[in-house]
Image (cartoon, helix red, strand yellow):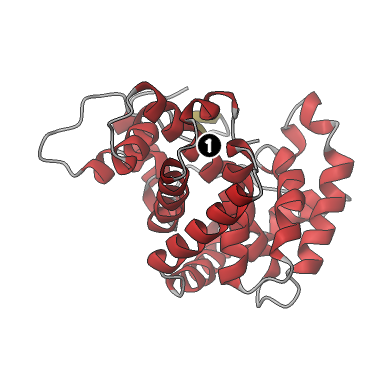
Amino acid sequence: MITDPSNARRILADLDHLVPEADAGSARSTERFRAATSRFVNGTVHDARRERLERRLAALEPGELARTATRLTRRARARDEPTHRIARTVPVACLAEHLGIGTPDALPRLIAGISAVYAGGTAAGASSAAAVPDADAATAEALQTARGHEDPALAVQLLVQAHLATAALIDGALRTIADEPAITTRAALVRTLRLDPPVPTTRRVGPNGGVVILSLADDGAPDDATPPEASAALAFGAGPRACPAPAHALAIAAAIVDALREAGIPVELGRTAGGAG
């Protein structure tokens, strides 16, 4: 377990440290989906998929995403949806709308099912193993829904990672605001990224085959000369596999938190929202 931020950055930038790969030949549709993403492959396969992913993200303007997230949050609040549900459904619905994926209202349920086993795959543990049949069914349905997209697996990957990470970022910001109501939304998000990152750890396989677990938290006091977002950057990873969409994630999360604060929702609800699962 590596907890020192500088060592974590060094390993994340080291091309000899690889991600644990998914099994493309698995009988499970969720595992085959993981193998079709950029997240769980290495080398030139990763590079080609990452390039396609970045090209698609470059066409999504963060300001437009923020406006859509605000609209969807206000609509959800008009239906009296609870804060924790908004944090989990709006980021997915927002991205799906901008990616041109059909029936975005139905997608959050499917994406939540996939997310239960996405990060760990076959090694996810007993509780996640119990969710495998539901996750496999959700994967098949989500990929079918995204079939009109030029790269359905990468589109669904973006939605899954939005569900896993953005909801946890929103939860953390709401907890911070509950403790410090005068704090700005942006500062609450940055503090969450630094001290309680939505994805707390990531794994790499070293040249000797050993698995290294890297903490993505950075609880050191930021340098006064360092921009706040830069001081929180480790939460988005580092090196060639860093999160490809930090600006998009922050735009969506900030819009949702701002809309919730505007509506006067008790931010203490963020305390019971749980993790990203």
- The reply, left or right, for residue 79 in relation to residue 15 is right
- The reply, left or right, for residue 253 in relation to residue 85 is left
- The reply, left or right, for residue 233 in relation to residue 20 is left
Write the residue at 40% across / 39% down.
235
| Residue farthest along the left direction in this orientation | 225
> What's the residue type where badge 1 is placed?
Ala
Q: Nearer the viewer, residue 51 or 251?
A: 251
Q: Is residue 78 above or below residue 220?
A: below
Residue 129 in picture, x, y percent from top left: 82, 32
The secondary element bearing badge 1 is classed as helix
Total labels drawn: 1
Characterize the local packing of mark 1: few (<14), some (14-19) or many (20 or more) Cα atoms within 10 angstroms.
many
Q: In the rendered image, which residue does mark 1 sit on?
A: 168
Write the residue at 59% across / 29% down.
273
Q: Nearer the viewer, residue 90 or 12?
A: 90
The image quadrant that residue 37 belongs to is bottom right
Q: Nearer the viewer, residue 44 or 250?
A: 250
Write the residue at 48% across / 39% down.
170
Residue 120 in picture, x, y percent from top left: 68, 37
Q: Can I make out residue 233 in this image?
A: yes
Is the C terminus in the top left, top right, bottom left or bottom right quadrant?
top right
